[in-house]
Image (tube, helix red, strand yellow):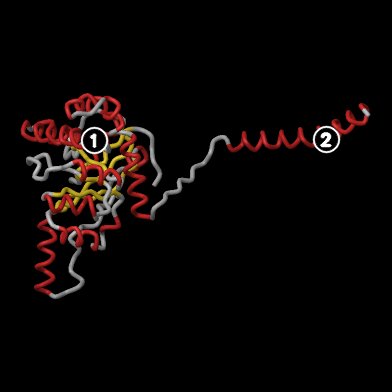
Amino acid sequence: MRQKNGFYDLSITAVSKPSLVNILSTLIDFGYRTVAINQIVEESAFETSDKKKKRKADKDAPSPIPPPISLDDIPQEIRNSLQILHRVTVCFSTSDVAHKMVSSENFKKYDIVAVIPTSKAALQHTCNALDVDIISVDISNKMSVRWNRKLYNMAVDKGMWFELPYALAVLDSSARRNLIEAGHLYHAFGKSKNILLSSGAENPMQIRGPYDVINMSLLLGLSEEQAKSALTNAGKSVLLRAESRRRGKSVVVIARSDFKDEILKETKDEEMEESHSGPILKKICKEET
């Protein structure tokens, strides 16, 4: 997974093509260079799938997780300016749903996997057993789960990141309160470690520039350094974590070096000097004797 410089927004809600193109164009103008198109799967999708399986008794029942959306309709100039990734976010309250999520045939097709645990049991299962990249929150509703320091540190040790999406908070006061509450809970239990800021935007009007987001995040208990890292370094770490989850425990990045020719030239010069210095040193030694 090749990474680009610039700011990260790893949650853009999958919408219709014209709106999605406008969102991506706005992100480019603001300086974002890596984005993820997010597809949200509600818990009801898994329940519907179960009913179909019982009714039809068919092992080939459709997967509750849809396949990633196609990027063929995105203009080439946008795809050249942005690294566009696929992300899925699953809302769940029981470990059974989490098991079905991992077993889905489309699960491994996504670059980034996120979950929204909606119960204490789901939160504990996420921190103990699940292998996901992001733990997100639904700020349209008051947080239904309560963190503690043990669970927070357990998730941090596993390399998971805690997402704070701000799009709904731009226009809705209750969502704004829920976002601020979530930010301060993360600060109280984990000193705001592994925080990822994203938009979750559904239209261009919900997007804010990176430095506006940094200023806004001071209300969430983050320092200026943490806020800037949440839009840059956090995104890089999430992608590396996602890559290790998909491919194994280690990630090898191979990049072309711009100094290759200079290194070869210096090596040749050193070899030339060594080859010429040999006879001279021998001659000096003979004259001294």
Q: Position of residue 186 (x, y in %)?
A: 19, 36
Q: Which mark is residue 227?
A: none
Relative depth, front residue between 152 and 236: 152
Residue lying furthest bottom: 57
Q: Amino acid at mark 2?
A: Gly
The answer to whether 258 is drawn above or below residue 47 in the figure is above
Q: Position of residue 38 (x, y in %)?
A: 22, 46
Badge 1: few (under 14), some or many (20 or more) residues near its Cα, within 10 Å? many
Q: Quadrant of the C terminus?
A: top right
> Cα distance, mark 2 to mark 1?
62 Å
Secondary structure, mark 1, is: strand
Residue 75 horizontal side relative to residue 150, left or right? right
- Check disc 1 and report the residue beneath it: 197
Relative depth, front residue between 1 and 31: 1
Between tags 2 and 1, which lies in front? 2
- Check disc 2 and report the residue beneath it: 278
Sequence order check, earlier mark of 2 and 1: 1
Badge 2: few (under 14), some or many (20 or more) residues near its Cα, within 10 Å? few
Residue 2 horizontal side relative to residue 158, left or right? right
